[in-house]
Image (cartoon, helix red, strand yellow):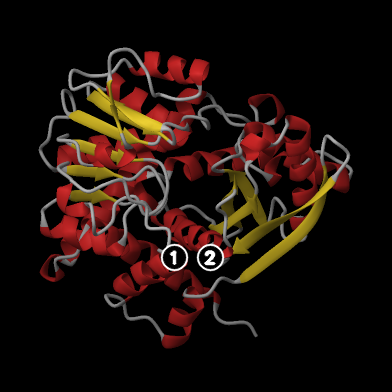
């Protein structure tokens, strides 16, 4: 077992390019289109002042990157984190392009971020920051052109502020300019649970594909934010035995199974899963190496790397986070027979229901939660089947699910680009 390790020097943009290059070798791409796909379409960097509660003014830096518009308006979240970098935002925008293409949604990929620690800001400071950032990126943002959504450090309230700011500039309400809003102002039923529900659906599909019974299977979930906590709860409700979960402060492990609703309540009261009941404490690194059937990394990038991949015992990995596994780790896991459902497939539930919310906002016609979940289930199952089909088509090449998903996503963007042509 290795010590807790996060490879700070691993550049997410270089990782995204390496994954793209690996899959692109299986496609007959024109040189020009290949180069187009390796570069974001546009990037915006903004520095803006924010008035703080003590009347001082601080300068913050934010980004918005559009990777591709070949298949439609750009779609992607906004994260608030002290670790945000332009290369991270570029990588997340590229991953979103492939994700929406794999799900066959009419979007291109985008991402945004502000360098800040939201936990250190008051609500009024967060509102000031959000409204100013929204104003700065309104050069790119619109219901027809670029539709932001929540990500790490942001949520429904953040989206409400962005929607209101944009609407005030336009002189009328524009609910379709963002997704992930509160229900009361045009948000979609089922959106809050969508990413975690998508993780459940592909876990069920993968378990069926591997002839593994999900009921009774042991599960470890790294990351207990919205995605991780919902994934853990739904997996438990489906009959799985969730034995370990973690957050930024540490993790807990109970081989007999955790009471996930109890853990959720404990975190609400204390701010962390640490210290819940009689569960044993584990680090985030130790959680990844536990003897479980299913591992769901739902935290940060680069958590599964070449140093700890040889020690991972899970038979099935379902990636709730973006970019949790490095290319070097992928090679190790494939050689050891671990079945990995990649992020651009596994966590596409969020953007899928964001698509539903966007459509509802444009039409001012809203669906029931049952309709939302039914359509989500159908799209996730079809996406899984499409990726498996690509993997089987390249059986002679021995490709894994990640490469198959990239081949599918890249081929759909390539086809759209060829059909549209190069302007002028």
Residue depicted at x 17% and y 59%: 332
The residue that disc 1 covers is 11
Residue 87: mark in rendering: 2
Q: CA distance from mark 1 to mark 2?
A: 7 Å
- Check disc 1: other Cα within 10 Å, few if <14, some if 14-19, many if 20+: some
Question: For residue 45, what is the image quadrant?
Answer: bottom right
Rendered-image quadrant of the N terminus: top left
Tag 1–tag 2 contact (CB < 8 Å): yes
Which quarter of the rendering shows the C terminus?
Answer: bottom right
SS for dot 1: loop
Res 392 quadrant in image: bottom left
Q: Nearer the viewer, residue 336 or 287?
A: 287
Q: Is residue 49 left or right of residue 42?
A: right
Between residue 380 and residue 217, name the one nearer to us.
217
Left or right side of 157 for 28 = left
Q: Residue at x 39, y 62 (%)?
A: 409
**Residue 174 shown left or right of residue 192 in the figure:** right
Q: Give residue 223's position: percent from left, percent from top.
A: 39, 36
């Amino acid at each position: 077992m290795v010590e807790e390790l996060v490879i700070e020097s691993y550049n997410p943009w270089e990782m995204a390019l390496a994954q793209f290059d690996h899959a692109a070798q299986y496609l007959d791409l024109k040189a020009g289109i290949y180069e187009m796909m390796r570069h974001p379409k546009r990037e915006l960097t903004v520095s803006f002042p924010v008035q703080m509660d003590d009347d001082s003014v601080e300068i913050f830096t934010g980004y918005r990157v559009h990777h591709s518009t070949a298949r439609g308006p750009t779609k992607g979240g906004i994260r608030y984190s002290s670790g945000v970098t332009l290369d991270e935002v570029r990588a997340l925008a590229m991953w979103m392009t492939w994700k929406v293409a794999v799900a066959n949604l009419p979007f291109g990929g985008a991402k945004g971020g502000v360098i800040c620690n939201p936990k250190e800001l008051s609500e009024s400071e967060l509102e000031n920051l959000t409204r100013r950032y929204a104003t700065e990126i309104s050069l790119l943002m619109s219901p027809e052109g670029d539709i932001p959504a929540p990500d790490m450090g942001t949520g429904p309230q953040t989206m409400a502020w962005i929607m209101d700011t944009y609407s005030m500039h336009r002189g009328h309400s524009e609910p379709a300019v963002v997704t992930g809003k509160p229900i009361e102002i045009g948000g979609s039923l089922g959106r809050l649970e969508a990413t975690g529900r998508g993780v459940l659906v592909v876990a069920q599909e993968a378990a069926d594909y591997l002839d593994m019974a999900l009921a009774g299977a042991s599960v470890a979930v790294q990351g207990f934010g919205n995605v991780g906590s919902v994934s853990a709860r739904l997996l438990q409700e489906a009959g799985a035995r969730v034995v370990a979960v973690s957050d930024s402060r540490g993790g807990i492990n109970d081989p007999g199974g955790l009471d996930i609703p109890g853990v959720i309540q404990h975190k609400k009261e204390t701010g962390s899963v640490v210290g819940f009941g009689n569960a044993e404490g584990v680090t985030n690194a130790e959680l990844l190496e536990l003897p479980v059937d299913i591992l769901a990394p739902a935290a940060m990038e680069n958590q599964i790397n070449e140093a700890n991949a040889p020690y991972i015992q899970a038979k099935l990995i379902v990636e709730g986070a973006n970019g949790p596994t490095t290319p070097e780790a992928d090679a190790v896991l494939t050689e050891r027979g671990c079945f990995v459902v990649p992020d651009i497939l596994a966590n596409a539930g969020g953007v899928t229901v964001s698509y539903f919310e966007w459509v509802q906002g444009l039409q001012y016609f809203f669906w029931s939660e049952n309709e939302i979940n039914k359509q989500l289930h159908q799209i996730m199952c079809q996406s899984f089947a499409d990726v498996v089909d690509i993997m089987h088509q390249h059986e002679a090449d021995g490709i894994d699910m990640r490469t198959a998903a990239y081949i599918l996503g890249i081929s759909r963007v390539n086809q759209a680009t060829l059909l549209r042509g190069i302007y002028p």
